[in-house]
Image (tube, rainbow, N blue to C red):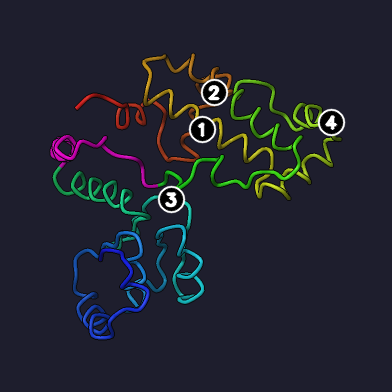
Amino acid sequence: MPGGAGTRTPDPELVDWLRAHGPRARQLVSVCTGALLLAAAGQLDGHRVTTHWSVCETLARTYPAVRVDPDPIFVRDGRLATSAGVTAGIDLALALVEEEHGRDVALTVARHLVVFLRRPGNQAQFSAQLSAQTAVRAPLRGVQHWITEHPDADLSVEALAARAGLSPRHFARAFTAETGLTPGRYVERVRLEQARRLLEDTADGVVGISRASGYGTPEAMRRAFVKALGTAPAEYRRRFRSHPV
């Protein structure tokens, strides 16, 4: 089911058709706001799904039986597969091709499409800087920029609070209130993004990347990758390393 303006006020006949035939489909797949059509037909009830970030709240509010996860670029739940925006639909399509026909076929398709094979489904729709709000107060905004530019620095609450000129307790409260993320969570996201970029775009070794990203050791970086992405750094690099096509 593709997305588009028509998904906001779906044709009742189309919804009835989906309700009748959807249960018999081996796979149901939606791109972007196409999830609204599947939800209207009752095909997403009880399942974890995603859609474009701008309609996640609407989907969750309108169809409370659907478990909406606004973060990942695509979600697989049994025979259901849902993706975020249009480009995330490409990632999902390549994942389905790889699942059905193997990595070599999926890589060939990706090359013809002139895209990289492929972003992991649990990659966030936004980077840390975009998913977090920008702090109102200048000292806190300055700390946000400092974290982004120095992921390998001492980014403990105490060190960041000193940079902002606040007590650790006041800083932690203010940072969370103004950005929507705790300092620790924000640092985790920035460091993970830094490590992923280095794995994708450079030939640097894992030891150097772990230090440059603020993890200190390869084992600490491996634990962070497994927790956030469900894969180890070496496997992530094998799958998502940038290369000319």
Residue 110 found in image quarter: top left
- From the viewer's perspective, is the residue at label 4 or at label 3 nearer? 4
Say left or right for 245 vs 157.
left
Say left or right for 77 vs 129.
left
Marks 1 and 3 in Cβ contact (< 8 Å): no
Distance from the alpha carbon under mark 4 to that under mark 1? 27 Å
Marks 2 and 1 in Cβ contact (< 8 Å): yes
Residue 165, numbered circle: 4
Q: Is tag 4's residue or tag 1's residue first in the polypeptide sequence?
A: 4
Amino acid at circle 4: Gly
**Residue bearing the label numbered 3:** 72
Count residues near mark 4 (Cα–Cα under 10 Å), then give few for <14, some for 14-19, many for 20+.
few
Count residues near mark 1 (Cα–Cα under 10 Å), then give few for <14, some for 14-19, many for 20+.
many
Marks 4 and 1 in Cβ contact (< 8 Å): no
State the quadrant of the C terminus: top left
The image shows residue 137, relative to residue 200, as above or below, that is below
Q: Which residues are magenta?
A: 102-121
Amino acid at circle 2: Ser
Q: Is tag 4's residue or tag 2's residue first in the polypeptide sequence?
A: 4
Distance from the alpha carbon under mark 2 to that under mark 3? 22 Å
At numbered mark 2, what does the secondary structure look like: helix, strand or loop? loop
Is 141 colored magenta in this rendering? Answer: no
Residue 213, numbered circle: 2
**Residue bearing the label numbered 1:** 192
